[in-house]
C-alpha cells in the first residue's frame, strides 16, 4: 500500500490496478485510495483473481506474501513466499506478456529468481528492488553523520538485500571527495545499522503501549517497514516508465559477473530503462568488497538451491 500511495502521490501512473487474496481488505484499501481522487491523478482499479483488470500492464510490482516476524530473517520466508509466487506469476504474465516485473516480496533476491523462472520472461525484464533501499539507508546515515543531504552522498550497497549486503566504502564520495572514514568511529557502525534497519523498525513499530489519552493498553501488533520501500519502489517505477536510463542498484541475474559462479540474482549497479535492466555496470571493488560480494552470492545460493518449484 505504501508503494501504491507513493506512486499516486508522484503522479506516475495513468492506471493503478491492485490485487490481493484478502478481498475485503483489498476493497477497503481501494476505496480509501479512491477517496483521495480529487487531489491525485491516476485511476485506481480493483483486480479479481483472473488478473484480467491488469491486462497489458507496463510494470507488475509484486509485494504479496508473508513478512518477517520480530527477529526473523528475510531468508526464512523463502519457502512460504515461493508458494505465493506460484499462484501469482503465471496468470499475471499471461495477461501482460510484455511487462517488467518488479519484485519486492522477501527474500527479494531469491523471489526475483523464482519469478524469473515462473514467468518465462528474459532476465532483464525481471528485477528486484534489492539494495536500492539499503543504499538509501546507507546514504541517509552517512549524510546524517556529515550533516549533508542523502541525495548528495554517492554511496552504494551491493549484494543481497539484507544480512550479507556489501557496503562499497572504497567509492563513497561527496562532490568527488572520497570519504576519510578514519576520523569517526561512527562510520564503523553505519553498515551494521543498515543491516539491522528493518529489524529495528519492525521491533519498534510493533510494541504495545499504554495510551495516555484512553488510559488503556493498546496491544502489540505485528511490525513492518513500509514508507522507505514505498519511496524506493515508486522511484524505480518512474525510471522504468520514463525510460530514464538511470544507474541504480537493483537485483539482477549476475552469474559470470565479478567472478560469481552461482545462478543467483543480487544487486549491482544497473542501467535501468523501459526494458528493465539494460546492462550491468562494472563497478571497481577492492579485494575485501569483492570477497564479500562473492560470499553474499554463496549465501543466497545456499538457500536457493534447496527450493523446489
Ligand atoms: N524488498 C524490500 O525492501 C521489502 C520487502 N518487504 C516484503 O514485502 C512483503 C509484503 O510485506 P507487507 O506489505 O508488510 O505485508 P502485508 O501482510 O501487509 O501484505 C501482504 C499482502 O499479500 C497478500 N497476499 C498473500 N498471498 C497472496 C496471493 N497469492 N495473491 C495476492 N495477494 C496475496 C496478503 O493478503 C497481504 O494483504 C513481505 O515479504 C516483506 O518482507 C517489505 C518491505 C521492504
Ligand atoms: C523488510 C525489508 O526487507 C526492509 O525493510 O529492508
Image (spheres, grey):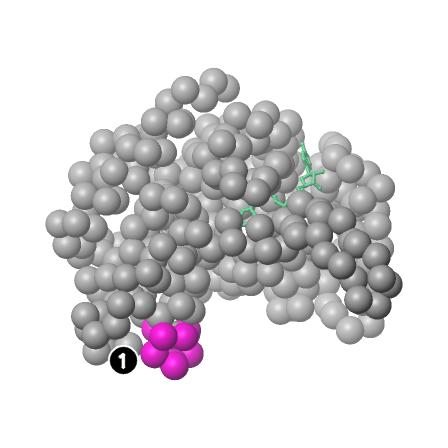
Residue 48 position in % (x across, y down): 78, 37
Can residue 281 be seen at all in this image of the molecule? yes
Q: Residue 262's x, y, as percent?
A: 28, 30
- Does 29 sit left or right of 263 as displayed? right
The image quadrant that residue 281 belongs to is: bottom left
Residue carrying label 1: 175
Residue at image coords 22%, 65%: 171
Q: Is residue 149 magenta?
A: yes
Considering only vertical position in the picture, is 153 above or below 218? below
Residue, far left: 287
Task: Specify few, some or many for label 1: CA neighbours under 10 Å numbering under 14, 14-19, or 20 or more.
Answer: few
The image shows residue 8 at horizontal and vertical percentages of 68, 64
Kindly tell me whether residue 243 is visible in this rendering: no
The stretch in magenta equals 144-153
Q: How many marks?
A: 1
Secondary structure mostly seen in magenta is helix
Q: Is mark 1 within 8 Å of ligand 2?
A: no
Q: Is residue 82 left or right of residue 278?
A: right
At 63% from the left and 55% from the top, the residue drawn is 205
Amino acid at each position: 500500500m505504501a508503494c501504491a500511495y507513493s506512486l499516486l502521490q508522484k503522479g506516475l501512473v495513468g492506471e493503478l490496478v491492485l490485487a490481493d487474496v484478502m478481498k475485503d481488505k483489498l476493497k477497503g484499501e481501494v476505496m480509501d485510495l479512491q477517496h483521495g481522487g480529487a487531489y491525485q491523478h491516476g485511476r485506481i482499479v480493483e483486480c479479481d483473481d483472473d488478473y484480467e483488470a491488469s491486462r497489458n500492464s507496463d510494470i507488475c510490482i509484486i509485494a504479496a506474501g508473508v513478512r518477517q516476524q520480530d527477529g526473523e530473517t528475510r531468508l526464512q520466508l523463502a519457502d512460504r513466499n515461493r508458494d505465493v509466487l506460484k499462484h501469482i506469476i503465471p496468470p499475471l504474465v499471461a495477461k501482460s506478456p510484455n511487462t517488467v516485473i518488479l519484485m519486492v516480496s522477501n527474500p527479494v533476491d531469491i523471489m526475483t529468481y523464482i519469478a524469473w523462472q515462473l514467468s518465462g520472461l528474459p532476465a532483464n525484464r525481471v528485477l528486484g528492488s534489492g539494495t536500492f533501499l539499503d543504499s538509501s539507508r546507507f546514504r541517509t546515515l552517512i549524510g546524517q553523520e556529515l550533516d549533508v543531504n542523502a541525495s548528495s552522498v554517492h554511496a552504494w550497497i551491493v549484494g543481497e538485500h539484507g544480512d550479507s549486503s556489501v557496503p562499497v566504502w572504497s567509492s563513497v564520495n561527496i562532490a568527488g571527495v572520497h570519504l576519510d572514514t578514519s576520523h569517526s568511529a561512527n562510520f564503523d557502525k553505519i553498515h551494521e545499522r543498515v543491516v539491522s534497519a528493518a529489524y529495528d523498525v519492525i521491533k519498534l513499530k510493533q510494541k504495545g503501549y499504554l495510551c495516555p489519552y484512553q488510559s488503556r493498553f493498546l496491544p502489540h501488533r505485528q511490525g513492518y517497514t513500509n514508507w522507505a520501500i514505498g519511496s524506493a519502489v515508486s522511484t524505480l517505477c518512474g525510471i522504468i516508465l520514463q525510460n530514464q536510463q538511470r544507474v541504480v542498484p537493483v537485483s539482477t541475474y549476475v552469474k559470470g559477473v565479478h567472478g560469481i559462479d552461482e545462478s543467483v540474482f543480487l544487486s549491482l549497479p544497473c542501467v535501468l530503462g523501459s526494458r528493465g535492466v539494460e546492462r550491468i555496470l562494472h563497478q571497481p571493488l577492492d579485494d575485501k568488497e569483492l570477497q564479500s560480494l562473492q560470499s553474499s552470492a554463496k549465501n543466497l545460493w545456499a538457500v536457493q538451491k534447496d527450493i523446489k518449484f
